[in-house]
Image (cartoon, rainbow, N blue to C red):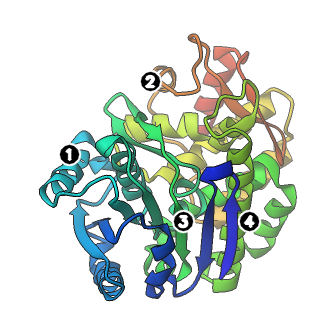
Amino acid sequence: MRRLSLALGDRSYPILIGCGLLNQTELLLPFLRAPKVALISNTTVAPLYLERMLNGLNQHGVAVTPIVLPDGEAHKTWESLNLIYDALLATRCDRSTTIVALGGGVIGDLAGFAAATYQRGVPFVQIPTTLLSQVDSSVGGKTGINHPRGKNMVGAFWQPKLVLADTDTLKTLPDRELSAGMAEVIKYGLIRDLPFLGWLEANMDGLMARDGELLAHAIERSCVNKAEVVAADEFETAREGGRALLNLGHTFGHAIETGMGYGEWLHGEAVAAGTMMATELSRRLGWLSAADVDRVRLLFQRAGLAVIAPDLGAGRYLELMSHDKKVIAGSLRLVLLKALGDAATVSDVSPAEIVAAIESCCHA
C-alpha cells in the first residue's frame, strides 16, 4: 500500500493507494467520529462493492445507511442531493455520522457537497472507484453539483478525512472510463511534471492494458502533484497560477459538457478535447511548437481519447465559457502552456485568437 498525505495543517489527511483496500474496512475506523456511516454509491458501483463494504463495516460494529443514486453526470443535480438529505434525515443521521462516497467523481462530488452542508458539516471519506476520481476529483476537497447553465457552479470546499483508492476497482472499469481518467493523468505532466509526461509516453500502452504496477505509479504520481498544488492554494485564491493550473483544458471542456448535455461526453473526454484547444491556442501565441501540439495529440490518441471537439459554434463556446469559475470581473482567465510541463493562467488573450483555436480543433 502506498501512503501519501495532503498537508493542510490540522485538516491534513492521508491518501491510501493499493490493491484489495476495500477488503480492509478497518482502515476507515480511525476516521469515524462515531460508529455510524452513510454509504453513498450509485446503481453501477453498488452491485459490485456495496455489500462487501456493508459486511466489513458491520463486522467492526459500524451501523451503515446505504444510499444508492442513479448513475451518470446527468444526475449530479439538486434532485440527487435531496435524495441524500432525505435518507440522512429518515435514518436520523446526526453530526457524528460520517458520509462515505463509494464511486466515481459524480458520487464523490455529490456526497462531499452533502457532507459540507448537512447540519452545517459532517465528516467525509472518499473511496474513489474510477481512474479519474482516484487521480483527481477525490483529492482536494472540491464538491458540488451541476447547473443547466454551467458545470460545478454550485458547491463547496470540503476536505475528506481520508481518501482510499483501491486499484482493483479499475479491473471492472469500462474502457471508455479508463481513457477518460487518463486525460487527467496526462494533465499533470503537461502543467508541471515534464518527466512524468515522458514516463507516460513510454508506458501508455501498458497503462491502457491495465498493468497494475504502472497504474499504481501513475495514480501516486498524479496524487503527489495534486496534493502539492492544493496544499499551496487550497481555495484557488492565488492571483496567478496556483490551484487554477489544475484546470488545464477545463474551461473549454466544461463548455463541451454543458453544450452537449451532461453525460454525452465524459468529463475526461471533454478535458482532452479542451486541452487540445488550450494547446493550439498556446501554439498560436508562440509558446508551443507544432511538434509540441502533435506530441500532446498523439498521447491523447494512444489513451483512446478524441482530439476533435464537437462543433458547437465559436459563439456558443464563448457564451458557455463566460460562466467559468475562473472569470474575474468579467475577464476570462485561461490556463495555457508556456511550454510542455509549464502552465500559466492568462487573461489577456484576444477573442479572435480564442475563436481561431476553437475552430481549428473542431475539424479534422
Q: Amino acid at mark 3?
A: Val
Vertical placement of residue 71 versus 254, above or below? below
Label 3 with label 1: CB-CB less than 8 Å: no
Q: Is residue 261 visible?
A: no
Q: Which residue is drawn at the image coordinates 72% and 31% (left, top)?
A: 281
Q: Is residue 291 visible?
A: yes
Please indicate whether residue 298 sits to the left or right of residue 178 in the image: right
* In front of the other: 360 or 133: 133
Q: Crowding near pointer 1: few (<14 within 10 Å), some, many (20+)?
A: few
Q: Quadrant of residue 183?
A: bottom right
Residue highlighted by disc 4 = 221
Q: What label does residue 209 carry, if any?
A: none
CA–CA distance in space, label 4 to label 2: 36 Å
Residue highlighted by disc 3 = 163
Residue highlighted by disc 1 = 82
Disc 2, SS: helix
Mark before the other along the chain sequence, 1 or 4: 1
Q: Crowding near pointer 2: few (<14 within 10 Å), some, many (20+)?
A: some
Q: What label does residue 316 carry, if any?
A: 2
Please indicate whether residue 248 sits to the left or right of residue 268 in the image: right
Mark before the other along the chain sequence, 3 or 1: 1
Disc 1, SS: helix
* In front of the other: 282 or 309: 282
Q: Crowding near pointer 4: few (<14 within 10 Å), some, many (20+)?
A: some
Disc 4, SS: helix
Residue 88 horizontal/vertical position (percent): 21, 55
Q: Quadrant of residue 284?
A: top right
Q: Which residue is drawn at the image coordinates 76% and 67% (left, top)?
A: 200
Q: Of discs 3 and 4, which sits in the foreground? A: 3
CA–CA distance in space, label 1 to label 2: 31 Å
Mark before the other along the chain sequence, 1 or 2: 1
Q: Of discs 1 and 2, which sits in the foreground? A: 1
